[in-house]
Amino acid sequence: MGHPTEPGNLVQGTLDMLILKALARGAKHGYAVAEWIHRTSEDVLRVEEGALYPALHRLELRGLLGSEWGVSQNNRRAKYYSLTAAGRRHLRAETEQWSRLSTAIGRVMQTAEG
Amino acid sequence: MREAWNTLRLRLKALAMRRQLDRDLEDELAFHLAMREASNGETARSGFGNPTSLKERCREMWTFVSLETFWQDVRYGARMLRGAPAFTAAAMLTLALGIGANTAVFSVMNAVLVRSLPYPDIDGLVILRERLPTTPLNVAWPDFADWREQNHVFQQMAAYAPDESILSGYGDPQPVPLAMVSAQTFPLLGTHAAMGRLFTEADDRPGAAPTVVLSYDLWRNQLRSDPAIVGKTIALDKYPFTVIGVLPPDFHFVLDKVGVYYPIGINAASPRYMDRGDHPGIAVLARLRPGVSMKDAGADLNAIMARLSVAYPHSNKDETAVIAPLYRTLLGDLRPMFLQLAAAAALVLVLAGANVANLMLTRAIVREPEFGVRAALGAGRMRMIRQLLTESLLLSILGGAAGVGLGTWAVHPLLRLAPPSIPNLDGIHLDSGVLLFALAVSLVTGLLFGLAPSLRATRRAASGPMRQRLRSVLLVAEVAIAVVVVIGAGLLFRSLVRTLGVDSGFEARGLLALDVTVSGPQVNPAYEVNFFSQALDRIRRVPGAESADAVMCPPMGGIGGGSCWTSPYAPEDRPAPPDSQRPWTLINMVTPGYFRTMKTPLLQGRPFTVFDAAHAAPVVIINQALALRIWPGGNAVGKHIRTLFGSAEIVGVTGSVRQFGPRESQQPELFLPNAQAPVSFMTVMVRTTGDPSTLASAVTAAIHGVDKEQPVLHVMPMTDYIARTVGRQRFSMALYAVFGVLSLLLAAVGVYGVSAYNVNQLKHDIGIRIAIGARPRDVLRLVVGGNALLIAVGLCCGIAGALALTRWLASQLFGVTARDPLTFITVVIALALVALIACWLPARRSTRIDPMAALRYE
């Protein structure tokens, strides 16, 4: 997997899954979500704002995320997103499916060539 | 599903707080930029992409794009309508008239046809009657008892009979419509007590204590909502009755306006109730068992009737049972009458819609540059059609709102014309049903009549001729519809005139009628005769009263229920047939001067006199219809005739009176002097020299001078009595007249509009013609000619339509056929004139066109 700098490269469902995962341990604002993904992927994945915010709003509209306005560490008004019960269920299902899929792909890719 | 709901909820919230949404998006992105700047020192915007488009994308997610566009269209449309106030006012008024007419008719239909029958499973409810081969009969109580025991087809059966009694002890004594009902009546109709309880079998048998159940209205109005009424005693005809319960406010009995209910079974042991032949008569309600058809039920019932006619040939020979759905019995010809009215109202609406469509076509010409610019700026055709449709919907909803106002306002003067025989007219009000109806009608109208013009207006190649064709179709339709509606109104008008012109057999003008019922413990036959004779003497002394007499069953059936008796008869100059084979005649009791007071001609013999008293030789007078039936040779006087009242000598023959209203045929009738057959209720007829209504209070006072406890009811001129019998016809005619005038006006406006438009279009053409010497007559021919042809086509279509449609009116017509040539010709000529004038007015202007101005204008 290369650098997915273009939002289109990161399949939409995958971005949604990453966002849900980023929020699994508690509420975060949009910037923190992008940072967490960037850091956790050891700088491999960088989420563009142009994809991040539409995705956050889409998930919120689907009822997978809740949101709340709070104050950030540097004392600014920020919108914090958190998982709803539905979001948590969705994340569990996605994780399961992802690991099945990546294992399968891994097996295919590990076969000897020729 | 839940996800979709969640989305909708959030979006609606965002819609409600649009500004908040914008600010939040702004803040969220600003925060992000600030964080980025703080963490790695990048200049704020680099690598961020286009923040505006990002915001727009987020924003779109939250909002309903199409709804926003719609809102835009609505605001734009509203601006357009405000900008053309004359157009808007004309279109709105037209639509308001059309929608108002429909709303008014619907609200009446809703109350009368739907809500007046609030019984569960109405289709299973039936009314049972008896009949002889030629005469319908009331049911005899013992027959009812046998039906109830022996039938296999009914779940429940109940008997009822109407009555009237005087409630005293609460203000002035007042008459209260009463219904005697059996205990099963209320469960059968699916109602429960609002207070107390309803009748049980124990209340409904001979010897039970006298109890009553009250209607909600009587309890609220006459008894002033007495909260402790249950268990109290009220006085009816001066006898005490215990109130056991009050019915709920929404209960309507099958008889109208009943205030008090009394268990009919208490009478069951009385000799009159036990008599199968001569009985007071009851009506029977029943609920069919599930799965039993009307036909099966009739067959089962008639099997019982066949056994009864063998067991009791004296009373039951040839009698059969008739079964009819309750709703048909209650609504009778009201359903077709209202459906016809609704159809007429719908036609008016179509006419109004056609007018508005025409107006919109004209508007489209004015707006051509506007559409040109919008098309050039890239607006698609669908977008422009949507815009135009939004405008027409906006118009129709505004028109609909005005129409609802107009309709609810107009219903009340119309209802004053309505006869009391139409049930639940008090139940008419603006409710959600009526509002929904008006909204639906408005939307459909707006769509239908906005669609064609908007399609035409936005067609790039929308050329004159194409619009012209649509206009022509609309014009023809308008004229045709107006012809149909006005012919309908005309036929009903002619029927009414014919009805009122019928010779009713007496002189109604100058006659005051009032009902008097004597009641109380002191009343006996001698008291009754004496009371009426004293009262009449006093009335005759009232200034302005020429003569006064009394009759038991007044012409036109009277208002207080119209008690007319019948009896089998047998002339004694020939062998009499067995009882049940005897023909029937109406029986009536009159005071001696009755025929003179009524100005009913005495054709043979003598009138009754004061000497035809209780113990004198029994005498009768028969009407011509009866005389001709028995003695076609014309020598009835001096013969003897036997009725239920015994044998009597015929002393006179009078002209026939239409006893049940002008549309009913003259029936055989036999009169007895009331001194020889006293009754407790009579209608007093006062022949007056001036306006009868001015004598009302003096006459009432004269009667109260004899006994002030006896109530005087329904005081009104006889002409009003007659007007009431034609109430339905008048009501229906009045509505048609309104619709007729509306459609005439709308059609005239429509023709005027088209003609004015033509003149405008042809201005240039006319200018040239005048310049080269055309005379005004030639110009008029040019302008009017085409339209006159269209009007002629419209008139022909209208005649064809009317020929096809007026037969639905046949049941309401009297004395004219549904294809009455006089009505057709008059209406067509009148409409042709109106249309031509509407066409000619704008055309006249064209002859005054200044050729130079018209040409320079180009």
Image (cartoon, coloured by chain):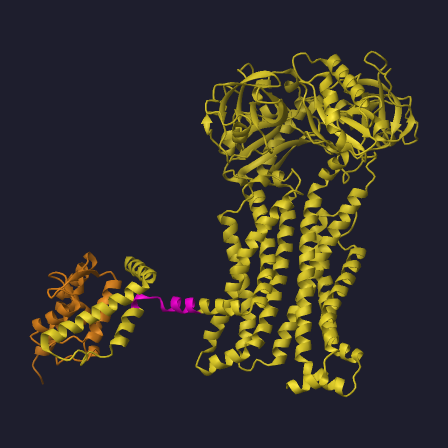
Chain that the image shows in orange:
A
Instruction: Count the numbered circles shown.
Output: 0
| Figure quadrant of residue B27 | bottom left
Determine whether B39 is above or below A93 in the image: below
Q: Nearer the viewer, residue A66 or A101?
A: A66
- From the viewer's perspective, tell me whether residue B185 is left or right of residue B490: left
Determine whether B475 is above or below B525 in the image: below
Determine whether B543 is above or below B70 in the image: above
| Figure quadrant of residue B15 | bottom left
Q: Is residue A11 visible?
A: no
Image x and y of residue B153, in percent = 54, 33
Image x and y of residue B448, in percent = 55, 65
Q: Nearer the viewer, residue A6 or B839?
A: B839
- Which residue is at 78% across, 17% downward? B534
Image x and y of residue B584, in percent = 77, 28
Q: Is residue B340 visible?
A: yes
Q: Quadrant of the C terminus of chain B?
A: bottom right
- From the viewer's perspective, tell me whether residue B449 is left or right of residue B737: left
Q: Quadrant of the N terminus of chain B?
A: bottom left
Chain that the image shows in yellow:
B
- From the viewer's perspective, tell me whether residue B390 is left or right of residue B580: left
Q: Which residues are magenta?
A: B61-72
- From the viewer's perspective, tell me whether residue B46 is left or right of residue B280: left
| Figure quadrant of residue A88 | bottom left
Image x and y of residue B835, in percent = 73, 66
The secondary structure that most of the magenta stretch takes on is helix
Is B34 one of the magenta-colored residues? no
